[in-house]
Amino acid sequence: MSEISIVTAFFDIGRKDWKGFERDNSTYANYFKFWARVKNHLIVYTEPKMAEQVKKIRADYGLLDKTTVIVIEDVRTVDNYVYKLINTAISNKLAVKYRRHPWMPEACNPMYNYVTYLKAHLTADAINRGLITTKTVAWIDFGFNHSGATYPKSEEFAVTLTDKGLSDKIHIFAVDELDDTPIFEIVRNMHTYIAGAVTIAPVSLWQELADLYRQAAISLGQCGFADDDQTLAVMAYRAKPELFEVHQMDNMYAALDIFQDVHWTKIETKQYKKIRMQAQKLLYKEKQYGAGLKLFFKYLWLKIQRK
């Protein structure tokens, strides 16, 4: 059992102006502050205007000496070839209209897809720079847990996460069972299989994961498509399933349950949300429209009752 390292990143991609998905930089800073008291070595990739704020947040917790901030002036230059492929795909109105929810960021915003693609790339970069001295590295989203959506007590993050009980695999976290639905159909119906907020792997596997993500992003781009890291993760898994250990969960942020030596207070997924997920599975995967619609209307009723 030994301590792990953590990599995360934040880049302003203009989300404060996205109608229905508005989150400004201060919102993300608060999300980060909620979990930033974790005592592990934390590597943060970010832009100049956020760098000092990241350092201050960690310093306020007495953790500046366990923090490395990598400043990137223009994130598009990190992998400009993939950025251009994604941008070209989403510039095509037919590709956007193909998506079930064309207004969602993964359908219409190239920077959103690009920065989510970079998760594995940046983690591998931290390793290649010699910044990692541990055997295991976790990617955790900068906005992870949305200030208590799943783990409501910020003080419980003042712990050291370790690799106790973790296999030497790439650990990914699924909110639905992986199947053989064609990738073009996953892109079209925008069904989520893998939650991308957390990925954990040995140092030795991160570059291979980054290569698999890049191969997936390029393959999609060459077909005129683009998607976020959730679909890239499915493609990476299908390419080399032997590298992965898949953990099933019913909550997009529940991945930290994998750390066996930490007790987390947890907000369980509401029953109506579980019913919604079951309805989506019946409607979009299994094509059982009668049963799916019945569950969907039950979900709507329970949600209305909750309000």
Image (tube, helix red, strand yellow):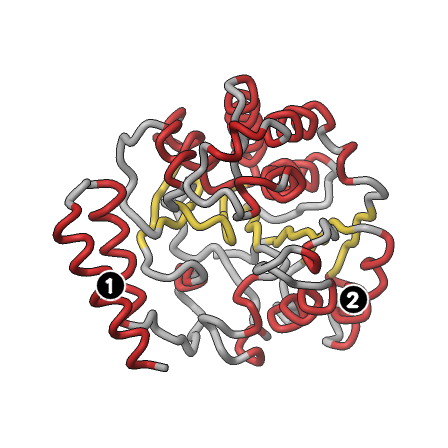
Q: Seen in the image, is 206 located left or right of residue 249? A: right
- Disc number for residue 217: none
Q: CA distance from mark 2 to mark 1?
A: 43 Å
Q: Quadrant of the C terminus?
A: bottom left
Q: Quadrant of residue 294?
A: bottom left
Whether residue 208 can be seen here: no
Q: Nearer the viewer, residue 60 or 88?
A: 88
Asked which secondary structure carries label 1, the reply is helix
The picture places residue 290, in percent across and down from the top left corner, at 13, 50
- Disc number for residue 275: 1
The picture places residue 292, in percent across and down from the top left corner, at 19, 52
Residue positioned 68% across, 51% down in the render: 9
Q: Seen in the image, is 159 located left or right of residue 169? A: right
Q: Nearer the viewer, residue 100 or 134?
A: 100
Residue positioned 34% across, 73% down in the render: 268
The picture places residue 28, in percent across and down from the top left corner, at 67, 64
Asked which secondary structure carries label 2, the reply is helix
Q: Seen in the image, is 100 located left or right of residue 140? A: left
Residue positioned 66% across, 30% down in the render: 87
Neighbours of disc 1 within 10 Å: few (<14), some (14-19), many (20+): some
Amino acid type of disc 2?
Leu
The residue identified by callout 2 is 64
The correct choice, above or below, for 16 with respect to 60 in the image is above
